[in-house]
Image: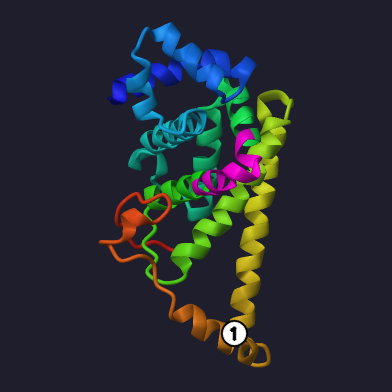
Amino acid sequence: MQDLKDQILDAALIHVVFDGWSDATLKAAVCDTGTDEAAVRALFPRGPVDLAVAFHRRGDAAMVAALTPEVLAGLKIREKITHAIRTRLELMEMDKEAVRRGTTLFALPIHAGDGARALWETADAIWTTIGDTSDDHNWYTKRMTLSGVYSSVVLYWLGDHSEGHAATWAFLDRRIEDVMRFEKFKAQVNKSPLLKPLMAGPNWLLGHIKPPRSGAMADMPGHWGTPKRQEDF
């Protein structure tokens, strides 16, 4: 079934450039591959939306495969995050228009939930691959923060015509630096005798938030298994 899904995706990418992630694209892919339409509909019950989601997840899988321990060895957390996002986009260079069409599809209110889940899955894939093992509210905040960084970088990348996407990588560095400055500010607030009392309530509340139990992880957006311990963003 995975082979069939890959065949349909490969065939669809030829037509996405012209017809977007649509029923026309799915039907053309079925015709080009000579497969049974009923079997394809079983794989993609919601049609083009599931096709676009499958394309996004295949990109995540390719990124994870590329982020081997050897590649990540010796890198700091921020360097691992930067390298992961850059790898994710570079792997999609030949299918940039398909990514653009997917962004348009997931921007529609009816598909906004699928778009948010796709971003969460990418962020979770990155954090898990680099070894994150948050066991408190940080499990969520790390993924929320990275989802925001990744989505903004993708939009910049789609409109970037600089050589080698140099402008995108510079933008990525700035976004990561913004996050690091915010994290530094939070740490300073928590250490300040004057400001720390103001955070007592929020910190108490956040301290009671836990990530999904191991048995319930599969029900969460972007479950990729039980992570390992690692420092914060």
| Residue 15, image quadrant | top right
Q: Residue at x 30, y 26 (%)?
A: 2
For image coordinates 41% across by 32% down, the residue present is 45
* Res. 129 visible in picture: yes
Residue 118's x, y, as percent? 50, 44
Q: Is residue 15 above or below residue 99?
A: above
**Which quadrant would the N terminus be assigned to in this image?**
top left
Asked if residue 227 can be seen in this view, the reply is no
Neighbour tally class for label 1: few under 14, some 14-19, many 20 plus, Cα within 10 Å: few
In the current view of this chain or complex, which residue is farthest to the left? 215
Q: Nearer the viewer, residue 48 or 214?
A: 48
Tag 1 secondary structure: helix
How many labels were placed on the picture? Answer: 1
Residue most extreme to the front: 38
Q: Relative to 155, is 207 above or below? A: below
187 relative to 52 in the view: left or right = right
Residue at the image position 71 percent from the left and 24 percent from the top: 163
177 and 225: which one is in front?
Answer: 225
Residue 91: x, y in percent?
A: 50, 27
Q: Main secondary structure of the magenta part?
A: helix
Q: Position of residue 5 (x, y in %)?
A: 36, 23
Q: Is residue 160 left or right of residue 69?
A: right
8 versus 102 height, above or below: above
Nearest the camera: 165 or 122? 122
Quickly name the residue at label 1.
191
What segment carries the magenta color?
A: 105-117
Kind of residue at disc 1: Lys
In the picture, residue 145 is in which quadrant? Answer: bottom right
Q: Is residue 203 magenta?
A: no
Residue 39's x, y, as percent? Answer: 32, 21
